[in-house]
Amino acid sequence: MKRSEINEACLRASACFKKFCWALPPSPKWDVTDFGLGNFPRFGLTLVNLAAEPEYCEKLMYARAGQTTPCHTHKKKKEDIICRAGTLALRVWPGRPEREDCVGAGEALVPVDGAFSRIPAGRPFFLEAGQRVTLVPGVWHTFASASRECVIGEVSTANDDLNDNVFLNPDIGRFPVVEEDEAIKFQLLRK
């Protein structure tokens, strides 16, 4: 991933956060990823780690229309994904899907706004600003902005991006290799 893409992603995210009155901490811990796929406009996410404690973490994320977080699950992490601004499209599966575009038989039973909902496996469902879904280990999921841009919150148990994420696509790498094509404007969090 080019440094220029990272700088632009952080600038766009900062502008969106400001537009929706999300103040960032004095020294934001930026995390920008193309998931090692080399196609940030299609598979990309811009994150700010707000809290990283032994028991819990909190992130603020930004996605533009067309950007998807690829299908994955977690070994240990339980998380609430919260739409903070815009509309967020999600798909969930109760077990490992054959493909990311697979609409399977069955349902995933997940809490949406605290009430259990039966979500058809692989079918899109949408969260509007203020709504949240709770995902437990073993629930496979993918999400994308369904609006021009989306601010997404995450509150979860302790985060371990290197060992806890299990992606359906084995080619995915959580942290991109950075090609330095311009000066660093935003320092990235690195594991």
Image: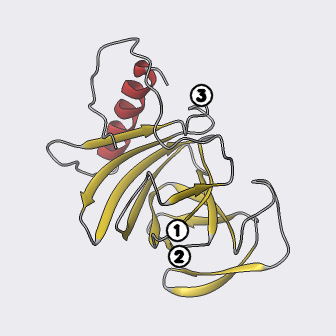
**To which residue does mark 2 refer?**
136
Residue with the most extreme right position? 105
The image position of residue 188, as x and y in percent, is: 31, 35
Callout 3: 10 Å neighbours few (<14), some, many (20+)? Answer: some
Is the C terminus in the top left, top right, bottom left or bottom right quadrant? Answer: top left
SS at mark 1 in the image: loop
Badge 2: few (under 14), some or many (20 or more) residues near its Cα, within 10 Å? some
Q: Which mark is residue 52?
A: none
- Circle nearer the viewer, 2 or 1: 1
Task: Count the marks.
Answer: 3
**Of callouts 1 and 3, the N-terminal one:** 3
In three-dimensional space, the C-alpha distance between marks 2 and 1, rounded to whole angstroms, equals: 9 Å
157 relative to 82 in the view: left or right: left
The picture quadrant where one finds residue 94 is: bottom right
Look at mark 3 in the image and give the residue it sits on.
38
Q: Nearer the viewer, mark 1 or mark 3?
A: 1
Residue identifier under label 1: 75
